[in-house]
Image: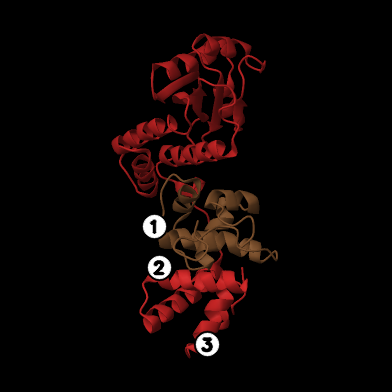
Chain colours: A red, B brown
């Protein structure tokens, strides 16, 4: 399965309500996606801090388990810190960062030079998603961090039995009304000029670009020209 | 066209300083229907939007720049400033 299909499946799992067995399968899929967040990632796991100590309930491979356990034996490490403190822990170079000396020593012995641990918010127990990489600085690019952050939020939602508050937020009431204004203009344009949805939207966007005006203004004017009224609730052509 | 023409969705969003939540709300405002997860995955390049979805997201980012008196830096698909 290619990476895009893996992501599509994960997002579907987050959106849907699944029984525990399927949820475990989805979490395993999330850890496999973790291995693709950037080239050079060699391990991905989940750390859970239980009353009698930390453990790894799921992992992508043996290496990830070994690196997690090195932290559990030492009693400290980025995975535990991320889970307990609820803040991301990024180690860009194990040879320089001296916060977790025993973990760094074990990591370097396994050829691991950097790591990123992200808290899994809202899990029943303090937990973190861990990514390990063979190269230093692998988690510095903002795009890599953003992808890892999305993966962590999806994993959180799965662990929270599909309580998707980590990935869904409320929408301002005016947004739908304004969007409807654009869709009505798009439809009017499609009908009068025999265009597809894509062609009519792209035409509106082209006018917005050529005239350097909001597509909402363009849409409102088009509806007026075609004799279709739009109410104040539509947003009156104001940009958001 | 400015020298910024042809930015990807992600680069345009980075330049704008918008959050993914901001972008999701904006794409609804300009006629989109994608959920938050899809918007984030499309922008990060994890999923490939269809051309209409791409152009709606491009418009959403570009509206941010329009409000600040700037041009449309993110390219549309199948239009005059397509990359």
Camera-side mark, 2 or 3: 2
The percent coordinates of residue A112 (x first, y second) are: 52, 17
Residue A3: quadrant of the picture: top left
- For the N terminus of chain A, the quadrant is top left
- For the C terminus of chain A, the quadrant is bottom right
Q: Is residue A30 left or right of residue B66?
A: left
Host chain of mark 2: A
Host chain of mark 3: A
**Sequence-earlier tag: 2 or 3:** 2
Which residue position holds label 2? A198
Which residue position holds label 3? A224
Residue A138: quadrant of the picture: top right
Badge 1 and badge 2 in a common chain: no
- CA separation in Å, label 1 and label 2: 9 Å
Camera-side mark, 3 or 1: 1
For this orientation, the residue located farthest to the bottom is: A227
Which residue position holds label 1? B50
- CA separation in Å, label 2 and label 3: 22 Å
Q: Is residue A30 left or right of residue A104?
A: left
Q: Residue at x 57, y 59 (%)?
A: B61
Give the secondary structure at mark 3.
helix
Q: Residue at x 68, y 63 (%)?
A: B70
Badge 2 and badge 3 in a common chain: yes
Contact check, label 1 and label 2, Cβ < 8 Å? yes
The residue nearer to you, when weighing B23 against B69, is B69
The percent coordinates of residue A37 (x first, y second) are: 47, 34
Q: Is residue B82 left or right of residue A1?
A: right
- CA separation in Å, label 3 and label 1: 30 Å
Crowding at mark 2 (Cα within 10 Å: few <14, some 14-19, many 20+): some
Host chain of mark 1: B
Give the secondary structure at mark 2.
helix
The percent coordinates of residue A9 (x first, y second) are: 34, 43
């Amino acid at each position: 399965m290619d990476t895009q299909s893996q992501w599509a499946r994960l997002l579907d799992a987050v959106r849907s309500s699944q029984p525990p067995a399927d949820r475990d399968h989805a979490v395993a899929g999330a850890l496999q996606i973790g291995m693709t967040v950037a080239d050079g990632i060699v391990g991905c796991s989940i750390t859970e801090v239980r009353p009698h100590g930390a453990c790894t309930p799921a992992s992508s491979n043996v290496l990830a388990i070994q690196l997690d356990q090195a932290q559990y034996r030492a009693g400290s490490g980025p995975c535990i810190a991320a889970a307990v403190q609820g803040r991301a822990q990024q180690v860009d170079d194990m040879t320089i960062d001296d916060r977790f000396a025993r973990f760094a020593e074990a990591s370097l012995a396994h050829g691991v030079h950097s790591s990123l641990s992200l808290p899994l918010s809202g899990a029943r127990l303090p937990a973190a998603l861990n990514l390990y990489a063979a190269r230093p600085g692998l988690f510095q690019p903002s795009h890599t961090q953003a992808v890892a952050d999305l993966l962590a939020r999806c994993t959180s939602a799965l662990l929270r039995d599909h309580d998707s508050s980590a990935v869904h937020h409320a929408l301002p009431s005016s947004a739908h009304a304004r969007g409807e204004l654009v869709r009505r203009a798009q439809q009017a344009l499609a009908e009068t000029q025999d265009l597809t949805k894509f062609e009519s939207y792209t035409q509106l966007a082209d006018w917005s670009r050529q005239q350097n005006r909001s597509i909402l203004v363009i849409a409102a004017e088009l509806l007026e020209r075609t004799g279709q009224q739009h109410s104040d609730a539509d947003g009156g052509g104001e940009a958001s | 066209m400015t020298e910024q023409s042809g930015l990807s969705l992600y680069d345009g969003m980075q330049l704008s300083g918008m959050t993914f939540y901001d972008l999701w709300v904006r794409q609804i405002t300009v006629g989109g229907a994608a959920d938050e997860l899809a918007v984030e995955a499309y922008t990060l390049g994890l999923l490939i939007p269809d051309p209409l979805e791409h152009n709606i997201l491009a418009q959403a980012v570009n509206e941010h720049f329009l409000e600040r008196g700037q041009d449309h830096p993110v390219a549309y698909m199948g239009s005059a400033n397509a990359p």
